[in-house]
Amino acid sequence: MAARLDPRLLRIGVSHFSHAEGGQTFQYHIQVEHDEASYEILKRFSEFDHLLQELEIQKYGNLPLLPPKTWNRPNDT
């Protein structure tokens, strides 16, 4: 049987974002740390959106809304 993770030792955050392959979309760099272990996971917005939809289907409550998929950048017109 696998050891259970202590959630008090779990830290998760978005460290930054960058252009995904092809440069048309962005990917978010998620830093996950537990005790001595550290991982970086790359995810696109659409993957967060899909996860939220799946959690809603499974009847998870009080889920946060995602920020807008796009936002005004300085060069947008």
Image (spheres, helix red, strand yellow):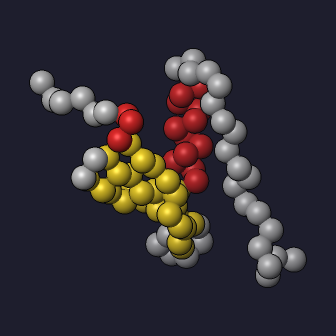
Taking the spot 52% from the left edge, 48% from the top edge, the residue there is 47
Name above or below for residue 34 compared with residue 52.
Answer: below
Q: Is residue 36 left or right of residue 30?
A: left
Q: Is residue 33 or residue 20 the one in the foreground? A: 33
Name above or below for residue 74 compared with residue 54.
Answer: below
Position in image of residue 68 (x %, y %): 73, 52
Q: Is residue 40 left or right of residue 21?
A: left
Q: Is residue 31 or residue 69 the one in the foreground? A: 31
Taking the spot 55% from the left edge, 45% from the top edge, the residue there is 48
Position in image of residue 50 (x %, y %): 55, 40
Position in image of residue 21 (x %, y %): 47, 72
* Count of numbered tags: 0
Image quadrant occupied by the C terminus = bottom right
Taking the spot 52% from the left edge, 38% from the top edge, the residue there is 51
Q: Is residue 4 left or right of residue 64?
A: left
Position in image of residue 35 (x %, y %): 28, 47
Instruction: Judge whether residue 29 can be spotted in this image.
Output: yes
Image quadrant occupied by the N terminus = top left
Place residue 59 in its image quadrant: top right
Name above or below for residue 54 compared with residue 19.
Answer: above
Q: Residue furthest bottom?
A: 75
Q: Residue furthest right?
A: 77
Q: Residue furthest left?
A: 1
Q: Is residue 58 or residue 38 the one in the foreground? A: 38
Instruction: Judge whether residue 43 can be spotted in this image.
Output: no
